Image (cartoon, grey):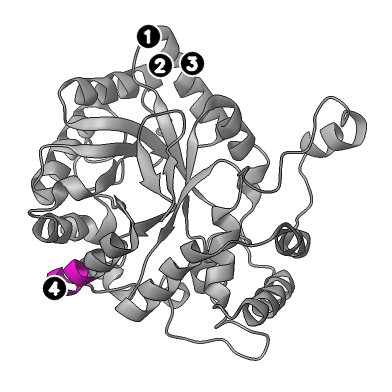
Amino acid sequence: MEQRQLGNSGLSVSALGFGTMTVGGRDRFAQMGNIQAEEASRLIDICLESGVNLIDTADLYSFGAAEEVLGQVLKGRRDEVVLATKGFMRVGPGVHDVGLSRKHLLEACEASLRRLQTDYVDLYMAHDPDALVPMEETLRAFDDLISQGKARYIGCSNFSAWHVMKALAISEGCGYARYISQEINYSLLARDAEHELIPMGLDQGVGVIAWSPLGYGLLTGKFRRDARPTETRLASLEAPGTIDEDRLYRIVDVLLEISRERSVSAAQVALNWVMSKPCVSTVLVGARNEQQLRDNLGAAQWKLTAPEMARLDAVSTTPEPYPNWHHRKFAAERNPVLPSMRSE
């Protein structure tokens, strides 16, 4: 599988990564998946055989159980993977059991390392921004984790572009480690990131880790104008925002057309579109079972053509917000449109 640099760093990750929200099966996460150690070990075997090296998790996933399962199944092969986890989310009732304070981050990282049964994580991420804690405090804590050898690199997730830029400026000014990646929601259904986050990432060397590339299952081909399955992640986890169903089905129609032309699944087409976009370092795929995982990983075995990308771009386009539309209408000469595909 293709290996890509994660942002402006020396860390290489596979074009597809394994997301573990379906691992652990604790509390409300059981509705999304209940993969335990034996099955998780088999899925990671498949990932490694396919060239996947990035394993992405978080202390939130199954409230620590996902990390616990990974800790069991990665014994003896920890060095074969790029292991990423996140901190921020509430993990207890206390006032310091949530957020990006120095106290919480250091304790959350230590707890993740214990559950993962490892001395370090390759990538430690802020799962969300924290408006109540100075960024200087957060970034100093991250920098200390790197200095202590408990994290190799740091990244952020679900930040706005101005949050990332502010963090990069603080890191540069204070000599702290900088965010090399941003884990963001990106799919044919969710293209908001193209307005600010992705241009910022290209400019600043912050690589994209794309989550929910299949739009909570809406882009797998199972959801059609005349069919709406009930046993899906969407049934147990409400998709954010308002879904424009007419737009969804127009996208699905083109996905199905290309999938028939290419003799691949609609899911592979949707994944390939995200993988082919500029700034995207890796795309996270989850799975409830081996068959689903193998099909998703098949997206890395072929590439959409420029005309196919254009068809998908056109059917999934959304109106540009201000000031982006103003740049295109009145200042296009000095603000060229970003490339629609990754450069070879």
Q: CA distance from mark 4 to mark 3?
A: 44 Å
**In the depicted structure, whether residue 296 falls above or below residue 14:** below
Q: Nearer the viewer, mark 1 or mark 4?
A: 4
Residue 331: in magenta span: no
Q: Which mark is residue 174?
A: 1
Q: CA distance from mark 1 to mark 2?
A: 5 Å
Residue identified by numbered label 2: 171
Q: Indicate the amino acid at tag 3.
A: Ala
Q: Indicate the amino acid at tag 1.
A: Cys
Residue identified by numbered label 3: 169
Q: CA distance from mark 2 to mark 3?
A: 5 Å
Relative image position of residue 147 (x, y in whole percent): 20, 20
Q: Secondary structure at mark 1?
A: helix
- For marks 1 and 3, the one nearer the N-term is 3
Q: Secondary structure at mark 3?
A: helix
Label 4 packing within 10 angstroms: few (<14), some (14-19), many (20+): few
Is residue 273 toward the left or the right of residue 282 in the image?
A: right
